[in-house]
Image (spheres, rainbow, N blue to C red):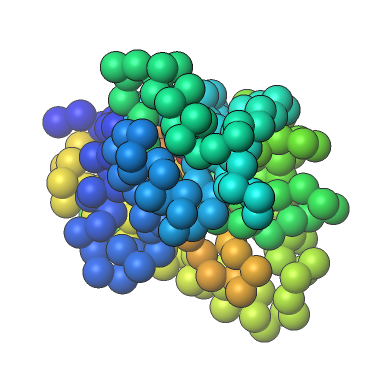
Amino acid sequence: MPRHVSSKWKKTAAIMDSASLRRLVPETVRFGGRELGRKLKRYGMVYVKPESGTHGKGVMRAERTAGGRCLLRTGRRQRAYSSCARMAEALRRKIRGRKYLIQRGIRLLKHNGRAFDLRVMAQWTPRKTWRTTGMIGRVAAPGKIVTNYHSGGKLVPVNRLLAGHTGKSSADRTIRTLERIGIKAGKALRRRYPGVCEVGVDIGLDRTLKPWIIEVNTSPDPYIFRKLPDPSIFQRIRRYAKAYGRK
Ligand SMILES: Nc1ncnc2c1ncn2[C@@H]1O[C@H](COP(=O)(O)OP(=O)(O)O)[C@@H](O)[C@H]1O
Ligand SMILES: [Mg+2]
């Protein structure tokens, strides 16, 4: 029974089994030139990413401008195309036969002018239940379209990020919602893949504080939690990981 599932397409399908999580997943389709045009028309901005990528590698952001032109951003580079059809054609050539996904783009909340999202860690416990054991915010490096730590993102406690956007009681509510999402995501993944013992859910917040599930990782990096001021979080994560036999 594999512990790790690399395909974001398969993991998205597993999440969609849960009616309450389904509403939190930005529409995701397999890459195709025609689909790209359609989704850009519908959403204005989409992410295009490798089906089995990690660390933010190969992640692109495509956007339609008011004048009917299209912008494509990768890393810190940006390219303008006279039409979305031209951009789709260039992308199709670049991607060739490889598997990519198109996902509705979420306009993430910002911290000091930089986009951020949240990583929620949930783990399988010796009592055979799921528990959310940690969460941490990730702030994109200046000018970047991804928040990943391995792409220069900065790790910041979630309550600090939320404090810039809402009051204490609303922030507490959001944190409890995130905890529930972690548990539900673990359950949904394990239902299809019974070897899965941990999930790291990447969750974006829009300006209404609605959480959006960007992706689910089945081998999430535990070490980012060492950056939290409270060392007990990382210790707890390690304790649960040892219980299911992860080094
Ligand atoms: N649909 C999206 N809307 C907004 N930001 C996104 C979206 N998809 C990806 N991102 C940004 O790119 C980062 C990397 O994308 P992700 O799907 O998590 O792939 P990876 O496996 O490389 O981490 C996310 O953490 C987020 O910052
Ligand atoms: Mg990710």
Residue 162 to residue 55: above or below: below
Residue at the bottom extreme, as displayed:
169
Q: Position of residue 209 (x, y in %)?
A: 60, 71
Q: Which of 145 and 179 is in front in this view?
A: 145
Asked if one can make out residue 222 in the rendered structure from this viewpoint, the answer is no
Asked if one can make out residue 117 in the rendered structure from this viewpoint, the answer is yes
Q: Position of residue 157 (x, y in %)?
A: 71, 53
- Quadrant into which the N terminus falls: top left
Q: Which of 125 and 196 is in front in this view?
A: 196
Give the residue drawn at x 60%, y 64%.
Answer: 206
Give the residue drawn at x 53%, y 70%.
Answer: 210
Residue 20 to residue 188: above or below: below
For residue 175, what is the image quadrant?
A: bottom right
Give the residue drawn at x 70%, y 25%.
Answer: 77
Q: Is residue 131 left or right of residue 84?
A: left
Q: Where is residue 51 in the image (x, y as percent from the top left)?
A: 35, 30
Q: Nearer the viewer, residue 186 or 242?
A: 186
Residue 87 to residue 166: above or below: above
